Structures are given as structure tokens and as C-alpha cells.
Image (cartoon, rainbow, N blue to C red):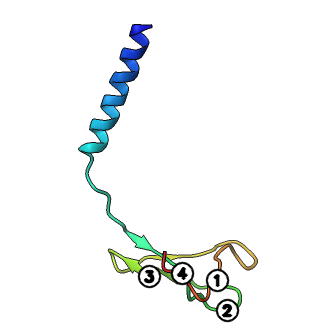
Amino acid sequence: MFNNYTKKGFLLLMTVLGTQFAEAQELLHYWHFNMLPSGTITAAVASDFSITGSGSITYNGTGAGYLDRVSPGDIL
């Protein structure tokens, strides 16, 4: 039984230390979808923020797609 708690304690310690010293992540692209054009979206939608300046997303399927139009948008 002691051995099981030792293993769990060690794993917990490694998880805490791993998250403590992990490098920060950086946001590459962000879309808020607040101002999408009406109708079926056939062109690429440019990102609202992009660290590279060229982020876009497309829907390659058929139909209206899965991009939700939200107007007015939210400021989450």
C-alpha cells in the first residue's frame, strides 16, 4: 500500500514541477466570428488576430458550414 502512495506522490510531484517550469504558449491565430458575411461562406475567413499576419480558416464541405454567425458579438 505504501508503494502505491509513493508512486502517486511521485507522479503528482512530477506533474507540478512539469507545469511550473513549462514554457509559455503563444497564441498563433484567433477568430471571434462576430462579423461573418451573410449567405453561404465560400471564401476563407481571415483571423481577427494572427502572430504571422496571415491566418485564415475555410470550410471545405458542402452546405452552410459550421461557422456560426454571431451578431452582435460577445466580448468574452
Residue at mark 4 to residue at mark 1: CA–CA distance: 11 Å
Q: Mark 4 — residue?
A: 74
Looking at the rendered image, the quarter that the N terminus falls into is: top left
Q: Residue at x 59, y 87 (%)?
A: 36
Left or right of 32? Residue 16 is left
- Which residue does the image show at 61% across and 88% down from the upper left? 71
The residue most toward the right is 63
What label does residue 38 carry, if any?
2
Distance CA(mark 1)–CA(mark 3): 15 Å
- Tell me: residue 58, above or below residue 42: above
* Percent coordinates x, y for residue 70 in the rendering: 62, 83
Q: Real-space Cα distance between discs 3 and 2? A: 18 Å
> Which of 2 and 19 lies nearest the eye of the viewer?
2
Which badge, 3 or 2, is on the more N-terminal residue? 2
Which residue is labeled 1 in the image?
Answer: 69
Question: Given the image, on which type of amino acid does mark 4 rest?
Answer: Asp
In-front residue for pair 36/21: 21
Q: Position of residue 50 (x, y in %)?
A: 37, 76
Instruction: Decide which of tag 4 and tag 1 comes sooner along the chain.
Output: 1
The residue to which callout 3 is attached is 48
Picture residue at 39% right of the left edge, 79% below the top: 49
Work out whether residue 6 or residue 42 is closer to the camera in this orientation and state it: 6
Dot placed on the residue nearer the N-terminal end, 1 or 3: 3
Q: What residue type is labelled 1?
A: Arg
Tell me the amino acid under the disc marked 3.
Answer: Asp
Question: Mark 4 to mark 2: distance in Å?
Answer: 18 Å
Q: Is residue 13 left or right of residue 42?
A: left
